[in-house]
Image (cartoon, grey):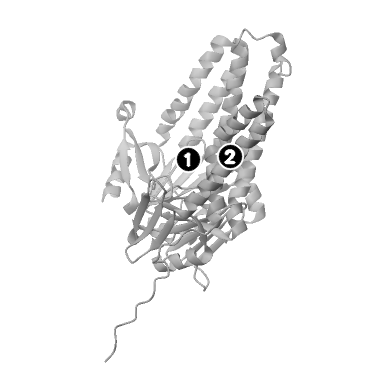
Amino acid sequence: MDGPAAVAPNPLGAPRRPHPAAIAIEALRSLREMALPLVVAVVLGAGSGNGGRAVVYGLVGLVIVLVTGLARWWTTTWSLDEHALRHRSGLLSRDERVIPRERISSLDTVQGPLQRLFGVLELRVQTPGGGRSAELALRAVTRRDAETLRRALGHAAERAEAPDARLRLGSGALLVSALTGPQLGVLVPVIGAIGAVAQEVVSDVTLSPSTFDGLPDTVLGWVALVGAAVGLAWLVSIAGAVLTFSGFEVVRDGERLRIRSGLLSRRAATLPLSRVQGVRIVEGLLREPFGLASLRVETAGYAGQAAVTQTLFPLVRRRDAAAVVDLLVPALAGPLEPLHGAPRRALRPYVAVPVLVAAVPSVAIAVLAPAAWPAIVALIAGAVALGVLRHRAAGWRLDEDRIVLRSRRIARTTLVASVRRLQEHGIRQTPLQRRIALADVGVAVGSRHRAHVRHLEEATALRLLGCLRS
């Protein structure tokens, strides 16, 4: 008579602490949190004329940081049983998190310089609708434990045999991507700060003449100063892009996309294809003239989407975009063109909006600086050109279960999405559009990203909406 069936042991069932490297990692986190009060204490100690007191304050702060890191490591445990991943932390206030196994959609890894030094990983547990950050972050996990956890959850590493598709970003393409894709999040604050400083200098009439020493005293000088600041911000943006996308690789392995990237901090993200709702083809201002674009992925409720996770591929030729989408996301395979465009009579409303926006600064220039009238001409001409480009860019295409929408703000963006996975779709009409029988068609995918085509014929918009609803 056979005995009871043997049960495979669960190596992760017993609570375990993170790798001891977590002590240093948590200490650095504490140091960042305490940096400002620690600096203030050291400066106050030095300012009192007692250098020894400043040293004591600094040493006390460092001891607190190290003790905090040790306490966080000692009080943190995690385990995986047949039902859930469990995580406990906290000394005085205990925090316990239980994540059911079926809710864990992916396990992403980040390996910063300190983690690379100790040979550990930060494991980020992702769940659908997890918010702006990962559901849980295990900050120092050995590679062995990470792989064991992946296998236990059915998220095995890349298959030994050849994957279904693999694309890598070469060094030349990386440089072109960095040069042609400046991050407005870096450039705009710099320009805004320059403007604020200039306004403060100009408006403060109590300043003495000596205050202006070293500042430009001509329009050309201010233009050069602003240009230098923007150029510096651009260099910072380029460096950030190189650090982020260096070694970028995307692999389609069965029903998952695996994305790896990063120079100093290496990231590895896993994206189930079942959660991909659409792909955006973005032709930036500097890329469009060269026929270049980036591919960005729209997913359902992916927590804390970093730039590398949002990016399907950083740089492709526009003519190759459809082939790359077909290769990496087969559910969205199909041609991107030809598109049904906006009617010719919609050109007037397309041009009217940017012209009205440009009219506001134009009036201000006419009143405050009449001699600068060439700027008014440039603003109006630019607005008209933008309206014409937006009219030319607008278009749509519907192929069975796939919709393609193209529009332009400044960059030209083409959305390829699954009709069945659209979160929203509808039409909108302003009173003026109603009078001239035009309407906008819009959809929402992923984390509520919206795409629309403006000023279509009303009958066309209603027919397209009916197809999306059926």
Which quadrant of the view contains residue 237? top right
Q: Is residue 238 left or right of residue 154?
A: right
Can you give x and y, in whole percent of width and height, for residue 333 in the image? 43, 58
Q: Is residue 413 visible?
A: yes
How crowded pointer 2 is (Cα within 10 Å; few <14, some 14-19, many 20+) is rated as few
Q: Amino acid at mark 2?
A: Val
- Where disc 1 sits, the SS reads helix
Is residue 258 rendered to the left or right of residue 371?
A: left
Q: Is residue 399 visible?
A: no
Q: Residue at x 51, y 35 (%)?
A: 410
Residue bearing mark 1:
393
The residue tagged 2 is 60
Amino acid at pointer 1? Ala
Indicate whether 300 appears above or below 439: below
The vertical placement of 49 against 323, above or below, is: above
Residue 429, position as x, y percentages in the image:
31, 32
Question: Splitting the image into 4 quarters, where does residue 219 fall?
Answer: top right
C-alpha distance separating marks 1 and 2: 62 Å
Residue 12's place in the image compared with 306, above or below, is: below
Residue 150, horizontal then vertical, whole percent: 44, 65
- Between 224 and 198, the one lying in front of the other is 198
